[in-house]
Amino acid sequence: MNVKISYKHLEHSPALDLKINEKSERITKYLHGSYHVDWVCWTDENEHWAELKVHSDQGDFFAKASTDSMYKTLDKVIHKIERQLDKEKDQRNKIHNKPGAKVYTDSEVVTEVEEEF
């Protein structure tokens, strides 16, 4: 997992970096293989904004949120991404686990391929 953190109009702090890295670790249970996480955090007047982009083999995911506190915003953004990833995981499992679908063993697959030729 690669994590990239950018700040606009906001002072970066080690505590904020640590919180973002902790939040990024929460999505590892949904993704397999390599993936890249981009965080962008900024303030606009009295609002704290955060944007999260996840690029993986399963697809690209995006979430954006704002609140009056940066830590609340991070919680909100990671919750949105987790819902998207969970929904994608459920859809993927429905396709592969349809009732009545025939499950082939390795020897059956080889036999069927040989019969075609």
Image (tube, helix red, strand yellow):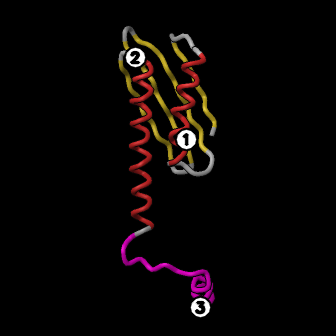
Q: In terms of sequence position, does the residue under pointer 2 or pointer 1 come before the other?
A: 1
Q: State the residue position of label 1.
A: 55
Q: In terms of sequence position, does the residue under pointer 2 or pointer 3 come before the other?
A: 2
Asked if labels 3 and 2 touch by Cβ distance under 8 angstroms, the answer is no
**Tag in front: 2 or 1:** 2
Q: Residue type at mark 3: give it.
A: Glu
Q: State the residue position of label 2.
A: 69
Magenta part of the protein: which range? 98-117
Q: Nearer the viewer, residue 91 or 25?
A: 25
Q: Residues within 10 Å of mark 3 (few under 14, many from 20)?
A: few
Q: Does 100 appear in magenta?
A: yes
Mark carried by residue 115 = 3
Q: Residue at x 47, y 16 (%)?
A: 42
As helix, strand or loop, the secondary structure at mark 3 comes to helix
Q: Residue type at mark 1: give it.
A: His
**Tag in front: 2 or 3:** 2
Asked if labels 1 and 3 touch by Cβ distance under 8 angstroms, the answer is no
Q: Position of residue 62 (x, y in %)?
A: 45, 36
How far is the residue under mark 2 from the one under mark 1? Answer: 26 Å
